[in-house]
Image (cartoon, helix red, strand yellow):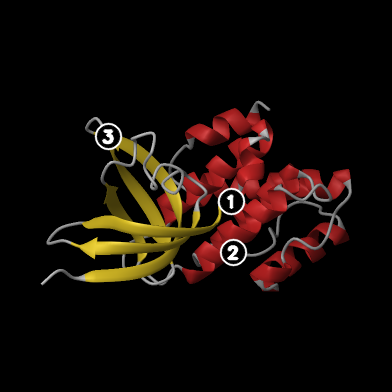
Amino acid sequence: MQENTQVTGMVLKAEPISEYDRRVVILTKEKGKISAFARGARKPNSRLLAATNPFSFGEFRLYVGKNSYSIQDVSISNYFEGLREDFEGAYYGMYFLEVLDYYTRENNDEKEMLKLVYQSLRALLHEGIPNRLVRYIFELKAMVINGEFPGMPKEGKWEESTAYAVAYIMNSSIEKLYTFNVTQQVLSELKAIADDYRRRYLDRTFKSLEIVDNL
């Protein structure tokens, strides 16, 4: 008997498999991070062609095999198409997806991480908040969710507004994260904190971050 399941999630990455197929990594609300095969997804007329690109968010109906999932059908509610027309925003977004691919695991409760990346991509498309600020908020909140954020650094002299911003990032719900702006001084201090903690707690380099740093 064929077993099917349905999940809600976002495509973190996709890679070609054989001539017409794709293997995708999806961060899901129900099963954490999973890999799935999309048969025929690289054919020009495939209904899975756009739906298996990174940033695609929606519902995925999966066939559960012995050792893998296969995508049977999709219903995408947000392709984040604006990022495809925004060179800088797209690279920030790819960096966020790369961090999530590193952080998340199958069968873990990754609902908060999924919400974080969804709201962070929305913030990249909002002209009122700089991409750099979105990045530092994303990095710090991801560490908070993962239980690695040690709080405001005790060493150094920081603006009072920087301490307030860090406390807000730590304690705010994800839905309210991207509702403030900061001065250039505070932005520089958030960068210093995020850079230091990232080097300490994320033991790898990210290809997309190298590009973002040179934008």
Label number found at residue 20: 3
Instruction: Find the distance from the CA under tag 3 to the CA under tag 1.
Output: 41 Å
Label 3 element class: loop
Q: Quadrant of residue 210?
A: top right
Q: Residue lying furthest right in this view?
A: 183
**Residue at 87% from the left image edge and 43% from the top image edge:** 184
Q: CA distance from mark 2 to mark 3?
A: 46 Å
Q: Are marks 1 and 2 in contact (CB under 8 Å)?
A: yes
Q: What is the number of the mark on residue 19?
A: none
Q: Camera-side residue: 202 or 95?
A: 95
In the rendered structure, the answer to whether residue 123 lies left or right of residue 8 reads right
Q: Residue pushed farthest top?
A: 214
Q: Which residue is at a point 40% across and 58% down the rendered structure image?
A: 74
Residue type indicated by callout 3: Tyr
- Residue 189 rendering spot, x and y as whole percentages: 77, 47
Q: Earlier in the sequence, mark 2 or mark 3?
A: 3
- Disc number lying in front (2 or 3): 3
Q: Badge 2 is on which residue?
A: 150
Q: Find residue 30 and report its horizontal and vertical position in percent.
A: 38, 72
- In the picture, measured across the screen, residue 91 lies left or right of residue 57, that is right
Q: Nearer the viewer, residue 209 or 197?
A: 209
Local SS, label 1: helix
Q: Are marks 2 and 3 in contact (CB under 8 Å)?
A: no
